[in-house]
Image: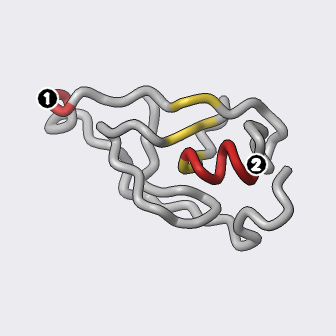
Amino acid sequence: MLELRPNCECCDRDLAPDEAGAWICSFECTYCADCATRVLRGQCPNCGGELLARPRRPSAKLATNPGSTRRVVNARGCAGGP
């Protein structure tokens, strides 16, 4: 099951598990749409992998399968991109 991290690793923007706007790589590094498309240009700065839109968890399933509360923030932010 996807971890569904609650924030963008670059800018620390909140990302709800049931809303559109989050992007992930195959290692679940998580970014907001702005950072993923405008700054990182679709490439994860951690692993070099492709960033894709993260699937949304249906609101009805969040009670028994909540998103993660662990926030991951890259100390470098998005400066410079991949």
Q: Is residue 43 above or below residue 52?
A: below
Residue furthest to the front in view is 38
Of residue 65 and residue 22, the one placed in the foreground of this image is 22
* Residue at position x 58%, y 66% in the image: 11
Q: Is residue 57 above or below residue 80?
A: above
Whole-percent x, y for residue 40 in the image? 76, 48
The image quadrant that residue 59 belongs to is top left
Of residue 3 and residue 79, the one placed in the foreground of this image is 79
Left or right? Give the position of 2 relative to 45. Answer: left
Indicate the secondary structure of the residue bearing disc 1.
helix
Name the mark nearer the viewer: 2 or 1: 2
Q: Mark 2 is on which residue type?
A: Leu
- The residue beneath circle 1 is 60
Badge 2 crowding class, 10 Å Cα cut-off, few under 14, some 14 to 19, many 20 or more, is many
* Residue at position x 26%, y 41% in the image: 66
Left or right? Give the position of 41 relative to 56. Answer: right
* Residue at position x 33%, y 39% in the image: 19
Whole-percent x, y for residue 62 in the image? 21, 36
Whole-percent x, y for residue 54 in the image? 50, 31
Q: Quadrant of the N terminus?
A: top left
Whole-percent x, y for residue 26 in the image? 66, 29
Q: Evaluate if marks 2 and 1 touch, with contact meaning CB atoms under 8 Å apart.
A: no
The answer for how far apart the CA atoms under marks 2 and 1 are is 32 Å
- Residue 40 is labelled as 2
Indicate the secondary structure of the residue bearing disc 2.
loop
Q: Which label's residue is closer to the chain start, 2 or 1?
A: 2
Q: Mark 1 is on which residue type?
A: Ala
Badge 1 crowding class, 10 Å Cα cut-off, few under 14, some 14 to 19, many 20 or more, is few
